Amino acid sequence: MSNAYLDALKKRRTQYSLGRNLSTSKEELATLIQEAIKHSPSSFNSQSSRAVILFGAESEKLWDIAIEEVRKVAPAEGFDKTEAKLKSFAAGVGTVLFFEDQDVVRSLQEKFALYADNFPVWSEQAGGMAQLSAWTALANAGVGASLQHYNPLIDAAVASQWNVPAYWKLRAQMPFGSNENGFGEKPFMDDAERFRVVG
């Protein structure tokens, strides 16, 4: 059975070797990311996901921030490997910062008190779907990416640098760029261990 969505999803792989060899413009990439997030599902159509899309020097600045913040808490011995990894993220074209709007979550908790405990969970699920949508859209356009989580270490510096509202909670960072290396085989566990089909 052929399915265009599944074909696109299968292209989504973690790429750590990023470059700047893309013919796609910044405007096209920004639109692609925005459309992917815009059309991702969220509970009660809350649209709680937010994004800051950084290109060029702004993206490099993010990973400089990450290096300095991680340096404060990581052992000095062997930090050169950590720094090299963080610099590899800066080698791409840009980075998407994913946030969840906590004001939206609180508003829904007040409006629908019966489900109050669920809204933070549903917000995280919406954020995950937005991340997957953006990542898959990028992969389908031939753009490499990975998903990183240097929050909460970098939260304050990020908020200050890009004037991010206090009620936007940073959840993930997605560096993206050209695929400078291929992908190995992706192992999968046996379907019988993961799925049950009933009826």
Image (cartoon, rainbow, N blue to C red):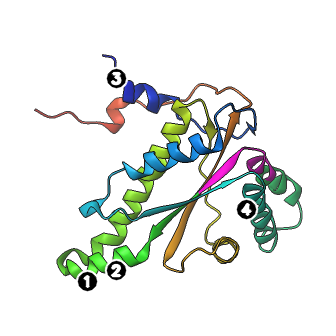
Q: Upstream in the sequence, badge 1 or badge 4?
A: 4
Residue 137 drawn at (x, y percent): 49, 38
Left or right of residue 41: residue 177: right
Does the residue at mark 3 contact the one at mark 1 (Cβ under 8 Å)?
no
Question: Which residue, given by chain and number where applicable, does mark 2 sit on?
Answer: 106
Q: Residue furthest left?
A: 199
Residue 198 painted magenta? no
Name above or below for residue 83 compared with residue 158: above
Q: Are marks 2 and 1 in contact (CB under 8 Å)?
A: yes
| Near-viewer residue (28 or 9) | 28
Judging depth in this view, the residue of 9 and 141 nearest the camera is 141
Quadrant location of residue 59? Answer: bottom right
* Quadrant holding the C terminus: top left
Label ID, residue 3: 3
Residue 168 visible: yes
Q: CA distance from mark 2 to mark 4?
A: 28 Å
